[in-house]
Image (cartoon, rainbow, N blue to C red):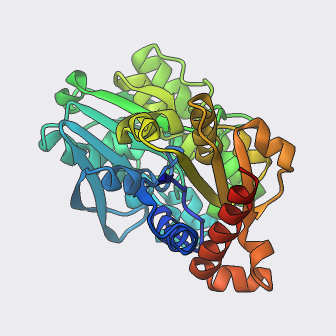
Amino acid sequence: MRILIAPDKFKGTLTGAEAAKAMAAGIRRVLPDAEISVQPIADGGEGTLEAVLAAGGERRETRVRGPLKDAVTAPWALTGTTAVIETARASGLEFITPTSEAAGNAHCYGSGELLAAALDAGASEIVLGVGGSAMSDGGSGALRALGARVLDDDGAELPLGGLALARASSLDLSGLDSRLEGVQLRIAVDVQNPLCGPDGAAHIFGAQKGADAPLRNALDAALSRWAQVLLDATGVDVQQPGAGAAGGFPAAFLACTRASLEPGFDLVAGLTGLDRKLAETDLVFTGEGSLDAQSAFGKAPLGLAERARNLGLPVLAVAGRITLSDSELSAHGVVGARSLADTAPSVSAAMTDAWRYAADAAETVLKAHLSTH
């Protein structure tokens, strides 16, 4: 039997690759001679880089400015002439302590430096996975790393960070890297939030970055100001669905480059050759940290299950926890599922020894499937 193991990350416990190895161990207990292949999946946010590297992408590293003061070494991938960048690797939450000061001052300058590195490497297409960001700066930091200048009423350049955009008056694009004109930027998004307003970047995602209610209001006003500056400079209205992802990162590039927003899972699936791998398998395993109501809205595991179902392939799922009913899972193509929470003696044990219980869950759900098919 040919089995494809294609999980997303189990956030906080296992990477997609680690989860796949654990599942493989459990499967081997039941079918020791199975032909197993592994391909981590992602929805365009964190985990995208890992999925591309697992599919054969070349790993690169660049030293860049982090979201505050410290420099970080950020990995990215090159596959042919396509570069794959996760903004979180340069400008992610992991590099800050979530406080109001950090939330107001964090920026994505380092993500722009990764874009410059990709251009230096000769990339003609750049895929940007966004998510897990520390900043709410509307992409202004990255744009500035590529040569743009954000100016106040006196023509002085503003400090980096989202809060400073409240004083933005104009955008000077004369120094913007001309190589961007010949590159297709594909931004993977799995949310539909606009840049500003009650459903915008600051109000919906600001709290997790450390912003209290007054600061979220201030950041929202600053991003609204930034949207007007972008409109004045380029004629592009960036107040559109998806522009509020990753602290509004897409906004600057929707206005100033040939960027497009694309559903994250579909984009990553294309990069990793997922459809070809599905065509060469008999049974699919997938999973993630939590299979819940949010999983039905563009998340990778159920997106994969639907693709597999359309090919007539059964899909089994392993997840940290599962709150969807059997009928809800079946509607997306999942014919059997088992959670670590139900396999381990306690939730804390499942978290502490996730590898062990992911293997056990895979073994259990496979035995159940084989007994009825």
x, y percent for residue 287? 62, 57
Total residue callouts: 0
- Residue at (23, 43) in percent of width and height: 79
x, y percent for residue 59? 23, 58
x, y percent for residue 269? 45, 38
- Residue at (72, 37) in percent of width and height: 332
- Residue at (77, 52) in percent of width and height: 292
Q: Nearer the viewer, residue 206 or 216?
A: 206
Eyeballing the image, is 350 above or below 69? below
Report if residue 27 is visible in the image: yes
Q: Nearer the viewer, residue 232 or 12?
A: 12
Q: Is residue 315 left or right of residue 280?
A: right
Report if residue 198 is visible in the image: no
Q: Where, by quadrant of the figure, is residue 272 drawn?
A: top left
Q: Is residue 328 left or right of residue 340?
A: right
Eyeballing the image, is 61 above or below 303? below
Q: Residue furthest top?
A: 235
- Residue at (74, 46) in percent of width and height: 294
Q: Nearer the viewer, residue 288 or 118?
A: 288
x, y percent for residue 202? 66, 46
Q: Where, by quadrant of the figure, is residue 177 drawn?
A: top left
Q: Is residue 15 left or right of residue 119?
A: right
Q: Nearer the viewer, residue 244 or 188?
A: 188
